[in-house]
Amino acid sequence: AKGDISSTSGMTADWTSSAAANMWWEAGGNITMPNIESLNWSTTGAGDLLWRAGGNISVSVPSGKSLAWSNGTGSGTILWDAGGSIIADNAGTSSTFTFTQTGTGNTQWQARADIKAKGKKTFTSNPTNGSTMIWRAGGNIETTSDVAGNLVTFSKTSATAGLMAWQAK
């Protein structure tokens, strides 16, 4: 596929699964979500949560809006995979941008180019095994200035949690 997945503004796509069902968006081009309303994805089963783009993944979360992903108690993996850059802008001071793993799956952001994380983000690892949370970039990892604060938090809340890392070439 060569197409894009995009929304001009106001996208709401809240998905939840308790089965071994994968939920994904896959675009040969870009995934572009400016000014979202709500993109909350979760699984408590063995299913994976995936955004994959041949180009860039770009999302902007305005004030009062939410992007919250979690893999619950299951073995599902959370993956954002971009052939270009991941540009994640938490533009609002009262918005939510979280990734939480409490099951046995891993959480990864992978970009062949850069990861640009603007605004406050929270990544929490509380698995029942040695699951990992990793950002990998072929270029740079940047937490750049924006209207909202730029605090990016990675927290291990379980002694069994595995590696939490940023890797930039």
Image (cartoon, rainbow, N blue to C red):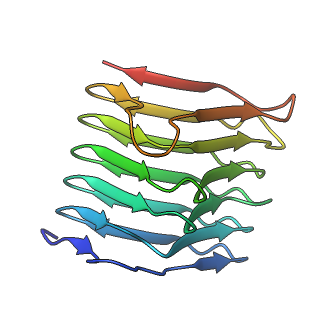
- Point 65% across, 68% down: residue: 42
The quarter of the displayed image where residue 74 is located: bottom right
**As rendered, which of 114 and 48 lies closer to the eye?**
114
**Residue 122, how many percent across, how many down?**
63, 43
The quarter of the displayed image where residue 70 is located: bottom right
Horizontal arrangement in the rendering, residue 84 relative to residue 71 (left or right): left
Q: Is residue 49 above or below residue 168?
A: below
**Residue 164, how many percent across, how many down?**
62, 27
The quadrant in which the N terminus is found is bottom left
Q: Is residue 72 above or below residue 147?
A: below
Q: Residue furthest top?
A: 169
Q: Is residue 9 above or below residue 84?
A: below
**Residue 58, how many percent across, how many down?**
31, 56
**As rendered, which of 40 and 93 lies closer to the eye?**
93
Horizontal arrangement in the rendering, residue 129 relative to residue 5 (left or right): right
Q: Residue furthest left?
A: 2
Q: Is residue 39 above or below residue 146?
A: below
The quadrant in which the C terminus is found is top left
Horizontal arrangement in the rendering, residue 68 relative to residue 19 (left or right): left
- Point 77% across, 52% down: residue: 103
How many numbered marks are there?
0
- Point 43% across, 22% down: residue: 167
The quarter of the displayed image where residue 96 is located: bottom right
Horizontal arrangement in the rendering, residue 110 relative to residue 32 (left or right): right
- Point 58% across, 60% down: residue: 95
